[in-house]
Image (cartoon, grey):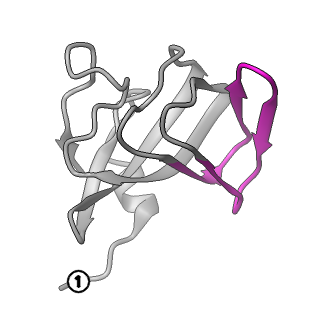
Amino acid sequence: MQKINLGEKLATFSDYFSPRTVTTYNGHDVMVAKLNGAFIWHKHDDTDDFFLVLKGVLDIELRDRTVTLSPGEMFVVPKGVEHRPVAREEVHILLIEPTGTPNTGDAQTAAPRKIA
């Protein structure tokens, strides 16, 4: 049991769209990630998708609208809803997902889980 400094964890890597698990919580991974550019359109059939912006501005594009998040703001994409995160400059986020959830919604195309 130790405190976790998210800034220190984010400083340990530079690649984008490759979440790093910083701890687990009740069967969920708590992760940080850096984003820059547009991710692929995807959905998660079995779980909601939680985004909390720590730094920068993130657009969550949905098929019918765009939700813009600033630092300290969060958004939950309901399961089954197609979306894509778009960062016009580097963005830092916190994610919480059930352990093993593929970041693309498809295990075949998902980034491997990494520990920060």
Residue 56: x %, y % from top left: 70, 44
Whether residue 36 is in magenta: the answer is: no
For residue 26, above or below residue 56? below
Q: Which range is magenta? A: 50-76
- Give the residue type that dot 1 points to: Gln
Residue at 48 percent of width and 20 percent of height: 42
Judge by depth and name the residue closer to the eye, 106 or 86.
106
Left or right of 35? Residue 110 is: left
Q: In which image quadrant can residue 41 be found?
A: top right
Whether residue 72 is in magenta: the answer is: yes
Q: In which image quadrant can residue 36 be found?
A: top right
Furthest residue in direction bottom, as rendered: 1
Q: Which residue is mark 1?
A: 2
Q: In which image quadrant can residue 65 be found?
A: top right
Residue 24: x %, y % from top left: 22, 65
Dominant secondary structure (helix, strand or loop) of the stretch shown in magenta: strand
